[in-house]
Image: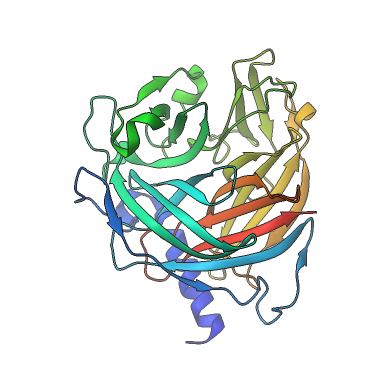
């Protein structure tokens, strides 16, 4: 298959999930209620830009390495939110099929080489029932702090908190969010979420950002939940949709975004926002650190996490949601912030 043909097919395949549930790809439904170990194979990517394996600088990010992840288990895929521990190796992720994914990255320094000790487990609803394969289980964002994993569910327009001490079978509690969040249209709900730094102007507040502007609005809404600056702000989308948010050590924010354009394929973008710019009533543009598309190893990039390396460098890890579609890929990309 030629590169152009694959891009055309990928563009068509990516468009279908955004066209409505009737056209969405089939998500796994029948998982055991307890954690199940699975095998995941990893193929190292030959550079970030196609045909330029030695090129390392891309805008404000430096390429470290990446993997294409595959598994014979049909429950693996659809990664839409992720968290890494302080070492950048212990991975906790959620899929938009309502499934927990945990594992351990193997690395050569900060270069990812594999993903092992992987377990899958259905997520629980407030009543303890399984969310896997159900519309309310469309988990789209994950952030972890103080022993709690907060997960944003797009179709249900709510945030649930899971105690990590309860393991992957924990039953969540409901997190209070503004009324405007709960009234977002289906498939335009919360897609990006992170805690602000406790030393930032937001004083550790929860930051929520919708995927796209609500109908009739030009900008993407976001909310500061709690803290001294609680309120609503907005982002200028410029043709991209928000997919994840991460907080930098200095308190600034990175926003991961996606753009799908038929029949060519998909682009990703990373923007940086100064911590001081997030305040009620602000309309934010930020600065573009990276924009990549047809000539790069990208797919439907939806998950992002940040950690600090032993040498003090800020490492950005990004994963893709393959929509449980054979034409797409589960990618893990890793960069150093310049």
Quadrant in the rendering for residue 279: top right
Q: Is residue 242 above or below residue 338?
A: above
Name the residue located 29 percent from the left edge and 55 percent from the top edge: 37
Q: Residue 157 sits in which quadrant?
A: top left
Task: Tell whether 156 sits left or right of 294.
Answer: left
* Of residues 306 and 21, the one drawn nearer to the viewer in this rendering: 306
**Where residue 57 sits: x, y (%)?**
78, 65
Rendered residue at 55%/43% (across/down)? 85
Where is 248 relative to 293, above or below?
above
State whether residue 26 appears in this view.
no
Q: Residue furthest bottom?
A: 1
Task: List the single residue furthest toward the top.
Answer: 228
Q: Residue at x 31, y 50 (%)?
A: 120
Q: Residue at x 19, y 48 (%)?
A: 32
User: Residue 333 is drawn in which quadrant?
Assistant: bottom right
Quarter of the image for the C terminus: give it: bottom right
- The picture places residue 223, in percent across and down from the top left corner, at 60, 25
Pinpoint residue 43: horizontal percent, then vertical percent: 49, 74
Between 155 and 338, the one nearer to me in the picture: 338
- 291 sits left or right of 332 in the view: right
């Amino acid at each position: 298959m030629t590169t152009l043909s694959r891009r055309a097919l990928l563009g068509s395949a990516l468009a279908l999930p955004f066209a409505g549930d009737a056209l969405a790809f089939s998500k796994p439904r029948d998982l055991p209620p307890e954690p199940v170990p699975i095998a995941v194979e990893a193929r190292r990517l030959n550079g970030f830009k196609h045909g330029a394996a030695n090129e390392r600088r891309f805008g404000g990010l430096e390429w470290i390495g990446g993997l294409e992840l595959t598994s014979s288990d049909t429950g693996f895929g659809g990664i839409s939110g992720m968290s890494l521990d302080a070492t950048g190796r212990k991975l906790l992720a959620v899929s938009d099929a309502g499934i927990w994914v945990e594992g351990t990255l193997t690395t050569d320094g900060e270069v990812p080489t594999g993903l092992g000790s992987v377990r899958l487990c259905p997520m629980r609803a407030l009543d303890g029932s399984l969310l896997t394969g159900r519309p309310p289980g469309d988990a789209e964002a994950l952030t972890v702090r103080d022993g709690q994993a907060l997960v944003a569910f797009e179709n249900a327009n709510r945030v649930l908190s899971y105690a990590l001490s309860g393991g992957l079978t924990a039953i969540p509690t409901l997190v209070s969010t503004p009324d405007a969040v709960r009234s977002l249209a289906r498939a335009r709900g919360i897609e990006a979420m992170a805690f602000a730094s406790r030393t930032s102007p937001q004083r550790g507040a929860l930051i929520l950002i919708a995927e796209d502007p609500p109908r009739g609005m030009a900008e993407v809404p976001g909310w500061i939940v709690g803290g001294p600056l609680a309120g609503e702000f907005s982002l200028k989308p410029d043709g991209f949709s928000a997919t994840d948010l991460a907080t930098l050590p200095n308190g600034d924010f990175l926003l991961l975004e996606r753009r799908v354009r038929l029949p060519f394929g998909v682009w990703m973008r990373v923007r940086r926002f100064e911590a001081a710019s997030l305040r009620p009533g602000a309309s934010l543009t930020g600065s573009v650190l990276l924009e990549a598309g047809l000539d790069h190893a990208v797919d439907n990039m939806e998950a992002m996490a940040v950690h600090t390396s032993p040498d003090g460098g800020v490492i950005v890890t990004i994963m893709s949601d393959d929509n449980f579609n054979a034409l797409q890929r589960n990618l893990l990309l890793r960069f150093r912030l310049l």
